[in-house]
Image (spheres, rainbow, N blue to C red):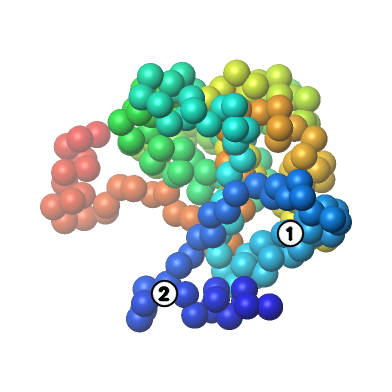
Amino acid sequence: AALPVLLQSYGFGPLHGNTILTNWYNRPDALLPGLEALKYGHNLMTAYRQGFNLVIFHCEASKWENLIKADGRRERIDIWWGGKQDSCRLMLLFAYLVTKTSIWSKAKIRVLTVGSGKSLAREKQNLIQLLDEARIPAEPHLVKDMEPTTVLEHSKQSSLVFLPFRIQQSRLTDRAGYSLERIITQLPPAVMVKAAEEIDLDAEPEEGTAGELAAAMD
């Protein structure tokens, strides 16, 4: 009951929050786990309707140490590009910011999207163009679909995985409507993202000193 009030009042003067970061639902002691999970999804939808981007983090306890220790294995970050484009852009921005930290600086970003047949070349070119415009170094990679088995096949050995998600009747699903619980425990540490606002990745200033500097760097 307090959540809507908290979301509306959070901030200081004109400065307001725009993103909710939460852990994946896990209440092993709940008497009615199904009902508790629905409450969790309902609360997320409440935040989304009030304009908050949603970011859910899942990591098995056995994989947490590798994330935080200095000599951990952090070679590749996967972004599954599909569904709402603003969510995909937000995932790309987050992945890029992760690589700007010292312990993730050597990790490569891979963007996976669906492409086959006649759409193969077009989809890859569109993705390359967006990455160029955002000036974010990432490798485009085409897959046949975004089914749970395909996600596991391509990302099981990655260090961090970003996935878009939906909320359908207070249940968290992937873009195809499958429950996220089908694959989330089998993946590396995963970040699920749902954007509630327009995300602009155009990083290049158009004029002035900043524009001249960007042109010189290009």
| Residue linked to disc 2 | 11
Is 48 left, or right, of 15 in this rendering?
right
Identify the residue at horizontal 20%, vertical 49% (top origin): 211
Q: Quadrant of residue 192?
A: top right
Residue 80 percent across, percent down from the top left: 62, 35
Which comes before the other along the chain, label 2 or label 1? 2
Q: Residues within 10 Å of mark 2 (few under 14, many from 20)?
A: few
Residue toward you, 90 or 61:
61
Distance, label 2 to label 1, CA atoms, is: 24 Å
Measured as percent of width and height from the top left, residue 171 is found at 79, 54
Mark 2: which amino acid? Gly
Q: Is residue 155 left or right of residue 169?
A: left
Question: Residue 18: x percent and y percent?
Answer: 48, 65
Give me the disc on residue 41.
1
* Residue 154: quadrant of the picture: top right
Q: Is residue 32 above or below residue 137?
A: below
Q: Quadrant of the image for the N terminus?
A: bottom right
| Residue located 54% across and 59% down the image | 20
* Mark 1 closeness class: few <14, some 14–19, many ≥20 residues within 10 Å: some
Classify residue 146 by image quadrant: top right
Residue 40 vs 107, above or below: the answer is below
Image: 78 above or below 196: above
Task: Report whether residue 85 is seen.
Answer: no
Residue placed at 58% from the left, 80% from the top?
5
Q: The C terminus lies in which quarter of the figure?
A: top left
Inspect this view and state whether residue 177 appears.
yes
Residue 194 percent coordinates (x, y): 61, 53
Amino acid beneath label 1: Gly
Kindly state the secondary structure of the residue where label 1 is placed: helix
